Image: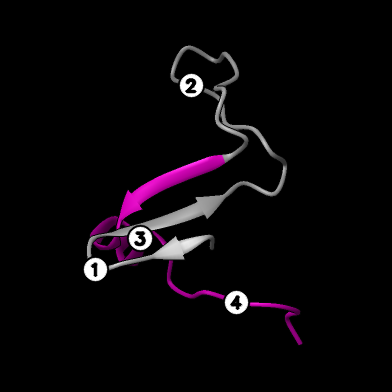
Amino acid sequence: MVAIDEKYVTLRNPWAHNNTADGSDAEDDGIIRITREDYEKYFNRTDIGEVP
């Protein structure tokens, strides 16, 4: 996770790229911004640092 505020969560893909809907590479260094509502819907937990 890169940042979080009241409305959005900003994430970074550790492989440093995201594909667009047509399969091409996006020019975004792996950064994605989603609503907190979607984050809570699609991610059931968040780990920060090493997972034991």
| Helix, strand or loop status at disc 3 | helix
Q: Residue at x 62, y 46 (%)?
A: 13
Task: Please say if 18 is above or below 4.
Answer: above
Q: Is residue 39 left or right of residue 52?
A: left
Which residues, given as a range, are shown in magenta?
31-52
> Mark 2 vs mark 4: which is more N-terminal?
2
> Mark 1 vs mark 4: which is more N-terminal?
1
Q: Amino acid at mark 2?
A: Thr
Q: Residue at x 35, y 60 (%)?
A: 39
Task: Please say if 40 is above or below 28.
Answer: below
| Helix, strand or loop status at disc 4 | loop
Residue to which mark 1 is pinned: 6
> Mark 3 vs mark 4: which is more N-terminal?
3
Residue to which mark 2 is pinned: 20
Q: Tell me the mark number nearer the camera, choosing from 1 and 2.
A: 1
Alpha carbons under labels 3 and 4: distance apart: 14 Å
Alpha carbons under labels 1 and 3: distance apart: 12 Å
Alpha carbons under labels 2 and 4: distance apart: 26 Å
Residue to which mark 3 is pinned: 39
Task: Please say if 5 is above or below 51.
Answer: above
Is the C terminus in the top left, top right, bottom left or bottom right quadrant?
bottom right
Q: Label 4: how many residues lie within 10 Å, few (<14), some (14-19) or many (20+)?
A: few
Residue to which mark 4 is pinned: 47
Q: Amino acid at mark 1?
A: Glu
Alpha carbons under labels 1 and 4: distance apart: 20 Å
